Amino acid sequence: MVDVALSSMALTVFSRIQHHPPAAKEASSKYHQALQIVQNEISQLDILHLDVQHIDACLLAIYLMGRYEAANCDLSSDLDWKDSPSFRHHDGAMAILGLWNDASSQTPATFIMKQTRRGLIRSSLLRNAQLPTWILDGSRFGESGVELAFDRIYVQTVSLHCTASLLSCTRCIAAELAEELNKKARELDEALQDWMAQLPSAWSPGKLILKDRETSPSSPFYRRTVYNYHSPVHASVWAHGFAARMLINSTRLTILDNAHIGVWGDLSLEKQRFECIDQLATMADNLASTVPFCLERSKDYRNYNSASPPIILDKNTKTKPYLASLVVWPLSIASSLEGIDTKQQAWFRAQLAGLGAVLGGGIFQFAETRWAKL
């Protein structure tokens, strides 16, 4: 089951990156074969005697098939990326993971279950769908340490964003509710700041100034200030933190923009809006300064806090897929939020589209032309 699903995904990514139609045809055949096998395997799941390895195999196969659908998503039509067929696989993974959770309360989660849950949280954010209660506790799914601390803040942020998005459709959130949601957003933003402040000092960025570098939507660098880290992995951690703060401040801005002024008064409301906009701009700048290092467009492992010139790679150097995967999610968030500077968001989207080409991801390749708002 997993082998066939993996073949379908690998072939379709190869066909897109290498422009090889025969591989696409073979990928389609493998995908439909995998679909039949997975449907049969799921129908045979025994609720009373769930085998962890069997669950893992189903989840992994579903993930791979979801990647296949995402890679083949064609947004040149009127299709919105939120309507991608890949989300049907996300729903299937949610059902299987929920089944395991209900039937195996004392069984530790596997690595695949942990990664599946992370993907489902992202999927819920993209679709503005509230998370089920059973999925909220990251420790149940193997999160621990720094990751668990971030997870606890992040699931609340996703939930608040969904609530704010639904209420904004009314264009008038009652003053008392708006104040409650705004307070929650501020608490989450403060918690994110505390989490970032407690990261190991060795993970923290240094600053480097690039001279005579082109900065434009098509440029590898948006700003002349570039953050330097000990490794791309550390840079990715900070990129996720910056993107999370962008998400919560954009959510807070939505709450304020749709609040019934009532209790607050114009002055207080405007001051808080300015605070959100300022934080959004700062975090967007931080993310834009981090992306080049994540992708190894600049690197200096000798003394990452030094003022010496960084090693700048040729802008035509191909990005490695594993590096692209470190930053594609923070860029997805930054490309989708309200309240971001237009030129800066154009740069985020251009970078995401470029990484989509590297990863063979059909959806990401349309980031510059048909990208929906969160």
Image: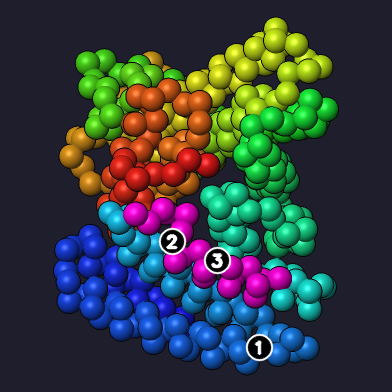
Q: Identity of the amino acid at label 2?
A: Ser
Residue at which label 3 appears: 90
Out of 194 and 201, give the one closest to the viewer: 194
Local packing at callout 3 (Cα closer than 10 Å; few below 14, some 14-19, many 20+) is many
User: Upstream in the sequence, badge 1 or badge 3?
Assistant: 1
Measured as percent of width and height from the top left, residue 256 is found at 67, 24
200 vs 99: above or below: above
Q: Main secondary structure of the magenta part?
A: helix
Q: Position of residue 354 (x, y in %)?
A: 28, 45
The x and y percentages for residue 132 are 73, 59
Q: Nearer the viewer, mark 1 or mark 2?
A: 2
- Residue 90 lies in the magenta-colored region: yes
The residue tagged 2 is 84
Q: Give the side of residue 317 with respect to residue 330, left or right.
A: left
> What number of labels is visible?
3
Crowding at dot 2, Cα within 10 Å, few <14 / some 14-19 / many 20+, comes out as: some
Q: How is the image coloured?
A: rainbow
Q: Point out residue 321 in the picture as x, y percentages from the top left corner.
A: 33, 54
Residue holding disc 1: 45
Q: Is residue 305 left or right of residue 255?
A: left
Q: CA distance from mark 1 to mark 3?
A: 18 Å
Q: Secondary structure at mark 3?
A: helix
Q: Which residues are magenta?
A: 78-98
